[in-house]
Image (cartoon, grey):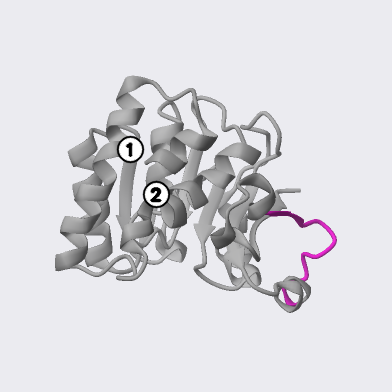
Amino acid sequence: MEIILKYFADFDSTQIAQLEQLEGLYKTWNEQINVISRKDIDSLYEKHVLHSLAIAVLCNFKPGAQIIDIGTGGGFPGIPLAIFFPEVEFLLADSIGKKIKVVNEVSSAIGLKNVTTFHGRVEEIKNRTFDFAVSRAVAPLGDLWKWINMMIRRGQKSEELRNGLICLKGGDLQKEINDSGLNKIIQAWSVDNIFPEPSFVEKYVIYVPKL
């Protein structure tokens, strides 16, 4: 938790309480349903919560914005972002039911009112549109954009960025970006420039605007 407060000083008491509960909840649920790597569970706040909040540094979602988290797994980046932006609506989607169960239980336990879930593939969501999609190490960029492009509405529901896709990825991404066909419109930021921690070397925030 200390590493979160190292970079963010303006959480209110409710947000701090919600963040503080995450470690115990995830450790308990991870013993039953493996949603976080065993070697990473003791680094939950750095490798999962802080990593997720890199998106919040770059994109200040406006109140009322609607965000979908594609392949949320155990709730990342969606749950930390929902804590950070209590006036923004988040739909956390995953095709694996036991992971959605963990998301629902954690969200309920910490009192998140702005999170709903969807059990299924994102392509199965019908009659919904969103301002932004977020994801973390789920699928190649081209696939993510193909799945979500038509669900993202045009506009600008953040202070800095037009509506679009924001994803957390790692490693050498040049081929993936070239293969996506989106290389002329993509923006990328190094996470270790946002949070200078060793675990964020070669981690990136990738943004694709809805044109």
Left or right position of 136 against 201: left
Work out whether residue 197 can be spotted: yes
- Residue 48: % across, % down: 43, 55
Label 1 sits on residue: 19
Q: Say whether residue 209 is magenta.
A: no
Work out whether residue 131 can be spotted: no
The local secondary structure at tag 2 comes to helix
- Residue 120: % across, % down: 34, 65
Left or right position of 42 against 195: left
Amino acid type shown at disc 2: Tyr
Label 2 sits on residue: 45
- Residue 188: % across, % down: 73, 55
Q: Which residues are magenta?
A: 179-190
Q: What is the spatial separation of the Cα atoms under label 2 and label 1, in whole angstroms?
A: 9 Å
- Rendered view: 56 above or below 197: above
Q: Say whether residue 181 is magenta.
A: yes
Which of 98 and 33 lies nearest the eye of the viewer? 33
The residue under the point 49% across, 68% down is 138
Quadrant placement of the N terminus: top left
- Rendered view: 100 above or below 131: below
- Rendered view: 96 above or below 89: below
Left or right position of 188 against 119: right
- The numbered mark at residue 168 is none
The local secondary structure at tag 1 comes to helix
Left or right position of 181 against 57: right
* Cβ atoms under marks 2 and 1 closer than 8 Å: yes
